[in-house]
């Protein structure tokens, strides 16, 4: 049952006001604090890559992340990750496929959001099949529905209100492929993406960056960090980007304010706390291109924009967070992390619907406003234990999260324009509609869990990792009767590693995850959750003291207990209003994962990976699907290579580039009682980069993306009637960036 919501309920919440005011004040104070700093004169800052002229890499201590921060390392890898488990493990010590997108890679490839990270990470796929402003992520054949922030998971829906994290406030991004239920709780057996925030530095520094790119795309950034007092450090980051795109009349902006403080409360206790405010806007989020009446691409110009100038997807996200770590004796530590976020989003736009005349269209209107409040906490203790004369590691923890979403609905205005000739359409052609509010729908998701993990050392060359998690999940539908609970779901983790020699490790692992579902059985009870089980075996190598990491893995992912519609509904107590199902559907993904990341030589960084994934139905309600491909618009082959090279004998010059290749994707489009195959053939993209270190403070960098101006679709349609879209990928794009360090 919907309720009418008063207009003031969707006003900007006090938390958002407070965060914007506090961060703006911090940004204004940062230059003054820098100018008045009593610290010793600042030494020449290091360049953006190893071996840069006129300087050597400075040693920067970052409290609470001493061995993991990638800023100023110039590296494409890191020494330690905690995303797969609660334990601090190197890539070689982790029995799953892992990647880290370091600060250096973010700068070299001019990444600005988590979508760019997905595009460049081996094994992950970025799709815009729901429109250019609604990107979705996937791995190993399944959607990625969680993004973590310093280890705390948050739900992500690319087609919904999921905010694309702005990379200006993050040091690095850690990715673990496969099922990750031990750390995320519920989810799909795809991957965990962990955004690791920047921390204050002990030395005082201010960095400025500005860029200009094709289509009047401009961006500026300031990053100030240093000592605030005895044992207290602070950091503020601000960035703003606005411009257009290759689509006619499309505009966007992205704003960010970020401020953190880190304090040594004692010799063994560190508090890290802060806040961020992110504001994103685009006037073309659903604006993909339609399929022709015969189910094929219309081959429209890439500049075609089927949207209207008045459309918008506007999102504000305000977040406060804190992390308290206390280091006990004998290597044990206790950590408590918590976060609260408020998000406001407006969807105000149209999507194309087929008209009465073939290849003529109409605009169907949609508007909704969202308020989302989410909170999460994580508390755990970890440390060594002695057993049978050997040293082992243990981690014990509890966690919880809650997300409340209120959706303000509006009247259905139906079609706001008709008989559109898409080849001659301009976004200024129609006036903005003004729908009335109708009601509000509210739901709350709660999840609580306890977990335990141990790394056993039965022999010098053998490690065994065992873990488990017990979850309580609740969905509260406050506007209807769709509430349900999942009590006491058990998630397991097991891995064994064998060191073949000083550089190579064989491993095998089993991990799983669960996903609640709403289908009902004959008695009207909710089905058991969908389970995702990840089986993986491979070999990892670590070279040059950990500067270069390599891995080869074979994997199988089973998504079981999928709702399978019963062929006989005679025993279904809710039929015909609601059909009944059984939890017997199964989808299986198999493949190989290869990766290389880090330094080949001190002046040569590389990040490369190849993934082959075959995802097929094993059992389904439609028996004809058995053995067929599960998600045909996800490529089976992905190859990604990024590299950066310091030119010897050329003062301060670095060159680099990226190569991206994906296999073909397709959809079977229903046309005239049958199906027509619409396809994007396999394609490759080349990006190039050149950077010149003018002096110890100034760097200039040129990036050229899609050098050969390849024409391709980043998402393809699946229907000729409505909502389905073709979305072009970016044409050639040129960007010039300058960075200045005080």
Image (spheres, rainbow, N blue to C red):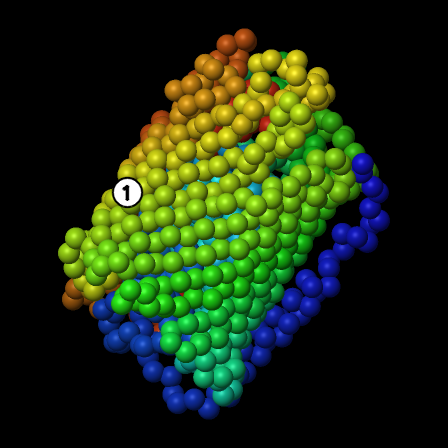
The vertical placement of 385 against 435, above or below, is below
Q: Which residue is mark 1?
A: 537
* Residue 719, x across and y down, in percent: 54, 21
What residue is shown at x 68% (from left), y 47% (from top)? 444
Q: Is residue 536 left or right of residue 312?
A: left
Looking at the picture, tell me which residue is in the foreground, 327 or 96: 327
Q: Is residue 208 left or right of residue 318?
A: left
Give the structural element (helix, strand or loop) at label 1: strand
Q: Quadrant of residue 330?
A: bottom left
Residue at far front of view: 388
- Which quarter of the picture shows residue 574? top right
> Front-most of 239 and 513?
513
Which residue lies at the image location 57% right of the left edge and 60% below the top edge? Answer: 377
Report the number of numbered marks. 1
Residue 68, x across and y down, in percent: 36, 66
Q: Position of residue 659 (x, y in %)?
A: 29, 44
The answer to whether one can see residue 165 in this image is no
Q: Find residue 48 and report its image quarter.
A: bottom left
Give the x, y percent position of residue 522.
64, 22
For the residue pair 13 and 413, the one nearer the viewer reads as 13
Q: Is residue 674 above or below residue 113?
A: above
Drawn side of residue 22 relative to residue 164, left or right:
right
């Amino acid at each position: 049952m919907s309720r009418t919501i008063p207009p003031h309920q969707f006003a900007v919440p006090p938390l958002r006001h407070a965060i914007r005011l506090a961060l703006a004040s911090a940004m204004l104070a940062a230059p003054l604090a820098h100018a008045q700093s009593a610290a010793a004169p600042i030494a020449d800052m290091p360049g953006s890559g190893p071996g840069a002229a006129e300087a050597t890499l400075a040693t920067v201590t970052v409290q609470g992340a001493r061995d993991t921060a990638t800023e100023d390392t110039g590296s494409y890898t890191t020494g330690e990750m905690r995303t797969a488990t609660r334990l601090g493990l190197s890539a070689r010590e982790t029995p799953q496929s892992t990647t880290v997108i370091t600060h250096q890679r973010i700068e070299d490839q001019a990444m600005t959001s988590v979508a760019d990270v997905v595009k460049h990470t081996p094994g992950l796929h970025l799709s815009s099949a729901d429109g250019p402003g609604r990107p979705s992520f996937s791995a190993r054949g399944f959607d990625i529905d969680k993004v973590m922030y310093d280890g705390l998971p948050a739900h992500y829906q690319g087609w919904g209100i999921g905010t694309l994290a702005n990379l200006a406030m993050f040091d690095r991004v850690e990715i673990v492929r496969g099922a990750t239920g031990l750390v995320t709780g519920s989810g799909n057996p795809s991957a965990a993406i962990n955004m690791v925030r920047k921390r204050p530095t002990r030395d005082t520094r201010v960095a400025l960056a500005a860029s200009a790119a094709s289509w009047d795309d401009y961006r500026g950034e300031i990053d100030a960090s240093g000592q605030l007092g005895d044992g207290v450090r602070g950091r503020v980051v601000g960035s703003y980007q606005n411009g257009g795109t290759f689509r006619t009349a499309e505009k966007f902006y992205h704003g960010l304010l970020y401020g953190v403080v880190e304090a040594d409360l004692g010799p063994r206790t560190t508090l890290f706390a802060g806040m961020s405010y992110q504001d994103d806007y685009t006037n073309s989020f659903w604006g993909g291109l339609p399929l022709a009446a015969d189910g094929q691409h219309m081959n429209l110009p890439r500049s075609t924009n089927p949207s209207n100038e008045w459309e918008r997807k506007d999102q504000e996200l305000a977040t406060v967070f804190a992390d308290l770590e206390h280091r006990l004796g004998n290597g044990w530590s206790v950590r408590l992390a918590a976060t609260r976020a408020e998000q406001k989003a407006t969807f105000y736009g149209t999507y194309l619907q087929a008209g009465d005349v073939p290849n003529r269209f109409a605009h169907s209107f949609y508007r909704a406003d969202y308020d989302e409040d989410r909170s999460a906490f994580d508390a755990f203790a970890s440390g060594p234990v002695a057993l049978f004369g050997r040293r082992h590691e243990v981690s014990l923890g509890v966690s919880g999260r809650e997300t409340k979403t209120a959706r303000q609905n509006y009247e259905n205005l139906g079609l706001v324009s008709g008989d559109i000739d898409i080849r001659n359409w301009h976004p200024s052609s129609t006036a903005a509609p003004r729908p009335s509010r109708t009601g509000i729908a509210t739901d709350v998701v709660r999840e609580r869990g306890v977990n335990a993990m141990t790394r056993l050392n039965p022999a010098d060359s053998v490690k065994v990792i065992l873990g488990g998690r017990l979850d309580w999940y609740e969905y509260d539908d406050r506007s209807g009767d769709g509430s349900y609970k999942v009590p006491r779901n058990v998630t397991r983790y097991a891995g064994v590693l064998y060191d073949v020699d000083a550089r190579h490790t064989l491993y095998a692992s089993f991990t799983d995850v669960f996903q609640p579902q709403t289908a009902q059985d004959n008695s009207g009870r909710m089905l058991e959750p969908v389970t995702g089980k990840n089986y993986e075996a491979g070999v990892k190598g670590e070279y040059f003291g950990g500067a270069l990491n390599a891995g080869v893995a074979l994997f199988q992912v089973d998504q079981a207990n999928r709702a399978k519609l019963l062929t006989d509904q005679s025993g279904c107590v809710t039929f015909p209003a609601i059909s009944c199902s059984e939890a017997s559907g199964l989808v299986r993904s198999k493949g190989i994962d290869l990766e290389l990341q880090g330094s080949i030589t001190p002046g040569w960084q590389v990040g490369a990976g190849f993934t082959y994934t075959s995802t097929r139905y094993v059992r389904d309600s439609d028996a004809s699907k058995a053995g067929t491909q599960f998600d045909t618009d996800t490529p089976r082959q992905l190859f990604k290579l990024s590299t950066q090279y310091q030119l010897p004998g050329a003062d301060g010059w670095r060159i680099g580039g990226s190569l991206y290749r994906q296999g073909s994707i397709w959809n079977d489009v229903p046309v005239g009682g049958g199906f027509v195959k619409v396809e994007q053939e396999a394609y490759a993209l080349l990006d190039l980069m050149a950077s010149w270190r003018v002096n110890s403070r100034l760097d200039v960098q040129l990036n050229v993306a899609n050098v050969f101006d390849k024409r391709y679709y980043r998402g393809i349609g699946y229907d000729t009637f409505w909502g389905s879209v073709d979305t072009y990928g970016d044409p050639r794009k040129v960007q010039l960036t300058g960075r200045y360090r005080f």
